[in-house]
Image (spheres, helix red, strand yellow):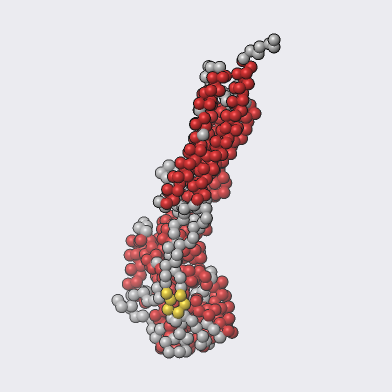
Amino acid sequence: MKLSLGDWLAGNRGEPIWLIVAGAALVAAGWLLPVQVKSVSPLLLREAGAGSPTLVEYGQTLRESDKLGPASLVGAAAKKLALPGAEQLASALAADARRQPELVPWGGLDPYLEQVFAGRTPSPGAAAAVSMPAIQEFLPARQRQAVRDYLANSRSAAVKSLLGTAEIDRARRFIPARRAGGQPLEATILMTALLQQGNWLSDTLGREVRARAEAAVEAKDLEPIEDFYYDLLSLARRLNWVQLGEWLRVCPDLKTAGEFAQLLRVSPDSMPVLYSASLQGRAPDGVTRYALSFGKGGVAGLEAALREGEGAVRQLVRRQVPVNPDSLLAWDTFASLSLRYPTLMTLLKYLCFFTGVWFVFRALDRAVVGPVLSATNRTLMHAKSGVMALVFSGVLFVLSEPYLLRGSPPADLLQVSIPALSMIGQVQAGQPDASPVGLSTIVTILFFAALQVMVYWICLLKMREIERQPVPSLLKLRLMENEENLFDAGLYVGIAGTATALVLQVLKVIDPNLLAAYSSNLFGITCVAMVKIRNVRPYKKKLILESQNAVPVKPAA
């Protein structure tokens, strides 16, 4: 009769070995799947970016639209990342600047700006071919007057509300616009109004700015919109007009504007990468949130995504997890499935872990426990193997998620703003408090549990050895009593684990948590109780009964 694979594995010959081999293969397969919960694989970024526009191609698109300012920042990011074609893009931008030097100071063309500053378009020449911060054009008194005259005829209610904020005499961060020294605030207000008039603000951002301006005018206090003015001034000192306008067109709200301005203040060297990722991914809110969450590691993750293309940037900012380098043996053939069905592939990965570990424990059950225990106790032991498989698969889960152990990259791009008159102070933000039960504590507890499981199996192995001895039951009983120290080994290992954990906590190798240390003692007590109550005591009872039955009973006189 032909046997199926399941029937063959159910046989006695070689079953433990094949179960162990199958279990190890399943664990290895799960480990090599390029899918994680708390991080993203570079293989997935490569798959997500396949076929999408590259950063150099996006820079060429901006250049062909005569947006030299944004294209130059994208080109700077491409050159920093050493992307193919970055040098050609830089050469093309340099040629455009020589051919149309009037586009360089403002970063491109803007009909509204040309109307306001009629006759002031930079003349061709070497001096003109220099990018100019957007706010610089609004600081001279003559320029501000020109903007006021131009916007005085505007029919936009939003523009009128913004211009009305210049009459407010109450401010905290700025000197009011109508006082001496109020030129920076007035220049910022006029610049914001011109951005609104020229439709440079996104729909959602424009509505929010208008609402804040109206609230400030009604309250006669600049506070509702003052933070945005400060953030916009900070951006305008680093970006030219078209660079600023292109970013504001994809900015969804005031919060994102504030976060992006903060990032440029604390990490100006990252501006090309952050700017390019914001524009190419069309999600500046996701980019700023990612960079603020993971700090310099987040900027490195954005760089990795920009190398792969627009799709990779979108994938990274959508998932909001750090980039985790793969092992050399990772299966890139499963990257497409992991990208399309992340939940299903994650479940498959941890199902492989659990099934593989369960196969190994089932093999140990049959090889070690089966000959010792009765049929009822063997059934209980198989159930316990399932529980232990859950524990060990949990250990594998933690080990396969490196950012569960070492945590996410630190958020080292934070700052605390101190409102003051026309200035802001910056101090290093403190690190968040560690959770009461850290990940290293969880791993330590799982390690101690696994250690006691090993002690438990050793005790059962010794019982099997005594069971197989070709000696009378009474002698087996004495051999069992001779192994009492072994059956108490769980307590010794538990005490040693507690002492070791306390030493490691003092040395700051693991988190200072007494739960991790004393869990070793708890598991040791539990292990010894299980060995002596569930295994040793029933087996001794069996030996005592067998030895008594072997002694002939003398008849009464």
Residue drawn at 58 percent across, 39 percent down: 387
- Percent x, y of residue 51: 47, 54
- Percent x, y of residue 384: 59, 36
- Percent x, y of residue 336: 51, 47
Residue drawn at 52 percent across, 58 percent down: 318
Residue drawn at 39 percent across, 65 percent down: 270
Q: Nearer the viewer, residue 90 or 317?
A: 317
Is residue 184 at all visible to an observer of this figure?
yes
Q: Nearer the viewer, residue 310 or 188?
A: 188
Q: Quadrant of residue 528?
A: top right
- Tally of numbered tags: 0
Name, please, the residue furthest toward the left.
126
Give the quadrant of the N terminus: top right
Name, please, the residue furthest toward the right.
557
Against 507, is 262 above or below? Answer: below
Q: Quadrant of residue 295?
A: bottom left
Residue drawn at 59 percent across, 26 percent down: 539
Against 222, is 277 above or below? Answer: above
Is residue 446 at all visible to an observer of this figure?
no
- Percent x, y of residue 66: 42, 70
Q: Nearer the viewer, residue 459 or 140?
A: 459
Give the quadrant of the C terminus: top right
